[in-house]
């Protein structure tokens, strides 16, 4: 009985100390032209435990929101969402035409080769918030980092 209680307390202690982390890969921002006031940030997120992306911030933009794009009756629609659920050990891709971080009210044009600092705010299952600072590479306007969609019969071999 004593061993069972100690094992239970140890499990609670280990759980309390375990902190959720999110692996962020291939973060990039689409470059802009002089008069453009908004662009998207894209990346792959893989959490160590269930988490939720609830906010993003960047000094290059006055407003930063989490967005999704959906196809409704042959029309692409973009809208802000309050957060994005991330399943443990599963990669969620934020990409053009899907989920992304929208940078609006840009303070200056973003040119290819620059780095954009972004702070991602996550919540774990206990609603505890944690942040992760990343740097996203700005792509040359029209460049994009996402692979081209493949047509049937095509492969990546050259």
Image (cartoon, rainbow, N blue to C red):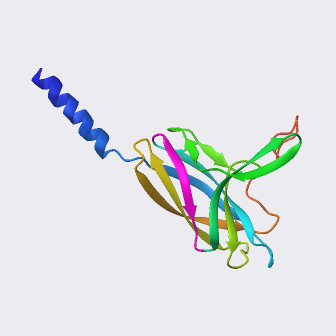
Residue 106 position, x and y percent, is: 69, 74
Q: Nearer the viewer, residue 110 or 75?
A: 75
Residue 157 position, x and y percent, is: 80, 43
The residue drawn where x is 44% and y is 49% is 21
Query: In the figure, residue 31 lies in which quadrant?
Result: bottom right
The residue drawn where x is 56% and y is 42% is 85
Q: Look at the picture and state if 127 lies above or below 145.
A: above
Residue 116 position, x and y percent, is: 62, 70
Answer with left or right where residue 19 lies relative to residue 26: left
Q: Look at the picture and state if 126 lies above or below 55.
A: above
The residue drawn where x is 71% and y is 74% is 110
Residue 88 position, x and y percent, is: 50, 38
The residue drawn where x is 79% and y is 63% is 143
Query: In the figure, residue 27 lies in which quadrant?
Result: bottom right
- The answer to whether residue 149 is visible is yes
Answer with left or right where residue 50 lies relative to residue 68: left
Residue lying farthest to the left in this orientation: 2
Q: Nearer the viewer, residue 143 or 63?
A: 63
Secondary structure mainly formed by the magenta segment:
strand
Which residue range is magenta in the image?
Answer: 49-59
- The answer to whether residue 148 is visible is no
Q: Look at the picture and state if 83 lies above or below 9.
A: below
Quadrant containing the N terminus is top left
Answer with left or right where residue 45 lies relative to residue 124: right
Query: In the figure, residue 60 lies in which quadrant?
Result: bottom right
Magenta stretch: includes residue 141: no
């Amino acid at each position: 009985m004593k061993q069972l209680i100690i094992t239970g307390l140890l499990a609670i202690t280990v759980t309390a100390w375990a902190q959720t982390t999110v692996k962020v890969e291939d973060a990039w921002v689409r470059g802009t032209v002089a008069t453009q006031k908004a662009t998207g940030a894209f990346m792959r997120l893989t959490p160590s435990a269930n988490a939720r992306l609830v906010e993003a911030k960047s000094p290059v933009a006055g407003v930063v929101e989490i967005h999704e794009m959906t196809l409704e009756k042959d029309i692409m629609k973009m809208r802000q969402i309050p957060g994005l659920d991330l399943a443990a050990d599963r990669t969620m891709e934020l990409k053009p035409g899907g989920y992304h971080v929208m940078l609006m009210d840009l303070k200056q044009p973003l040119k290819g080769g620059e780095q954009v600092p972004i702070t991602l705010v996550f919540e774990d299952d206990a609603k505890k918030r944690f942040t992760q600072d990343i740097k996203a590479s700005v792509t040359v306007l029209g460049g994009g980092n996402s692979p081209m969609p493949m047509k049937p019969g095509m492969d990546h071999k050259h």
